[in-house]
Image (cartoon, rainbow, N blue to C red):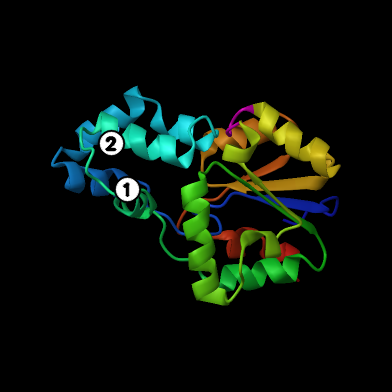
Amino acid sequence: MKNDKIKNIIFDLGDVILNIDVPLASLSFADLSGKDQKEVLTIFRENDVFRQFETGFLSEADFRNFVRSILNNNEWDDHIIDKAWNSLLLDLPLERVELLKKLSQSYRLFLLSNTSSIHITQVHKILHAATGIEKLDDLFEKVYLSYEMGLMKPDIRIYQQVLDDSGLSAEETIFLDDNLDNINGAAKLGIEAIHVQKPLTILDYLKDYAV
């Protein structure tokens, strides 16, 4: 049901705007290293790879060298690591972009994503190939990325920073994310948080706002 107080909509990226398959990245690194996928996941988790890269603690070069180190292979070129890391990024359905364009006529739109610079570079390539649009910034009033902010969802500070930076009222804002922890983090500030769950998409959740 439509909330008539809503003036702003904040979108997550992965599995909200862009389709992703997260396990594909660990599977790609498993294939490269000859290790079991579960072992690769354990190594990544124990070394806090995702958080370090997606909060900007590691630069692209640092990340690649870190992966070479923890997976014991110093012969991988940068593009090999990038390709494996980006393998989880799938397609960007055109109808979601058309929905964003329609919503932007009545609402202020923002993006808030836990991501890395390597992923964003690839996302822009996928976006341009699918729609002719150069970058995410062309679809949103402002794009907020974890690696630039030094914070990750569901840290409540990242939502507050978005609200403060763009002058948004929580009560006038919807946030859509596929991760329940992220939804709960936003809800703590009074944001109307919508948990996007397959097979439903943002076209289903926001149909009342796109009329």
The furthest residue to the bottom: 132
Q: Amino acid at mark 1?
A: Ile
Label 2 packing within 10 angstroms: few (<14), some (14-19), many (20+): some
Picture coordinates of residue 78, whole percent (x, y): 34, 49
Q: Which residues are magenta?
A: 151-155
Number of marks drawn: 2
Closer to us: 95 or 123: 123
**What residue appears at the point 61 percent right and 31 percent down from the top-left corner?**
150
Q: Position of residue 75 (x, y in %)?
A: 22, 43
* Residue at 21% in and 39% down: 37
| Residue holding disc 2 | 68
Pointers 1 and 2 in contact (CB under 8 A)? Answer: yes
Q: Relative to residue 127, is residue 42 depicted above or below?
A: above
The image quarter in which residue 35 lies: top left
Residue 94 position by quadrant: bottom right
Image quarter in which the N terminus is found:
bottom right
Query: Label 1: few (<14), some or many (≥20) within 10 Å?
Result: many
173 left or right of 90? right
Seen as rendered, the residue at the extreme top is 46
Q: Position of residue 211 (x, y in %)?
A: 76, 71
Does 154 appear in magenta?
yes
Residue type for callout 2: Arg
**Residue for badge 1:** 81
Q: Residue 3: horizontal and vertical position, in percent?
A: 79, 52
Secondary element under disc 1, as helix, strand or loop, is: helix
19 left or right of 97 in image: left
Of mark 1 and mark 2, the one earlier in the sequence is 2
Please identify the dominant SS of the magenta region. loop
* Horizontal side, residue 39 vs residue 208: left or right: left
